[in-house]
Amino acid sequence: MSSTTARSEQENGDRLLAGDIRALRKARGLTLAEIALKLGRSVGWVSQVERGLSVPSVGDLRAFADLFDVPISLFFSHDVPVEEERGVIVRAGSRRSLGTNESGLVEELLSPDLGGSFEMLRSVFAPGAELKTEARRPTEEAGYVASGAFEIEIDGVWHRLGEGDSFRFEGKPFRWRNPGIEPAVVIWVVSPPVY
């Protein structure tokens, strides 16, 4: 690989990182000033990071991950696609992984990036995994069970779903669990994006 190609790929990766940080900030309804205050940085620095003019250190990325409540791995898994596919196509081998096997939930980002009005995720729930504490987000969410058994509690009512079943809810408290002995795979759509 030539130094020009390597530099171009690095610049593309930096732009994707910058776009992700901007999308996460906007999804959480935060201003540049609020982010700067929480990180102990200047507004100018945060602005430069969001425009791809400054590249945050690993420590800065850890602070962004904590602030946005996302795994730090989200910022490191940028396989830069070919130019014609950037922002349009996500290849199976290039999905960004979110979460760990230890949590019982591993998600892959199916959307090309964190921008746009929604995000699409492939969520794999380990047998016995569950979200014990109710979650509530200011989002509209929908899911399609691709395989396995999956149970979701929406607004206090449990629903048992199997392969081919789907669901949708907006702004309601929810919990989930996999009561089966096999992983459950759910294609999950969230609007606006939360990762």
Image: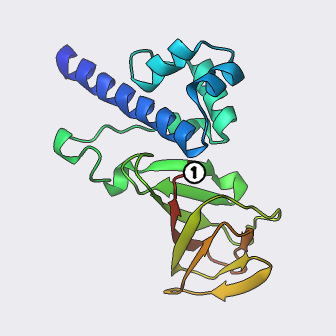
Q: Give the position of the N terminus as an image quadrant.
A: top left
User: Residue drawn 62% across and 77% down?
Assistant: 182
Q: Is residue 14 left or right of residue 186?
A: left
Report if residue 149 is visible in the image.
Answer: yes
**Nearer-the-camera pick, 95 or 16:** 16
Q: Relative to residue 6, is residue 152 drawn left or right?
A: right
**How many C-alpha atoms fall within 10 Å of the one at disc 1: few (<14), some, or many (≥20)?**
many
Q: SS for tag 1?
A: loop
- What x and y, as percent, mark residue 120? 46, 60
Quadrant for residue 103, please give it.
bottom right
Residue 69: name its quadrant. top right
Observer-nearest residue: 110 or 185? 110
> How far from the left and from the top, in percent, is residue 60?
60, 20
**Most foreground residue, 101 or 99:** 99
Which amino acid lies under the numbered mark 1 shown in the image of this protein?
A: Val
Q: Where in the figure is residue 150, as x and y percent of width and height? A: 64, 79
Give left or right: position of 69 versus 73.
right
Query: Does residue 168 lie above or below 84 as drawn?
Result: below
Identified at 72% across, 73% down, the residue is: 177
Which percent across, then down, holds residue 17? Answer: 43, 31
Q: At 53% from the left edge and 40% from the top edge, which residue is drawn?
A: 26
Q: Relative to 88, say whether 21 is above or below.
A: above
Residue denoted by label 1 = 194
Left/right placement of residue 87 relative to residue 36 reads: left
Residue 56 against residue 27 in the figure, above or below:
above
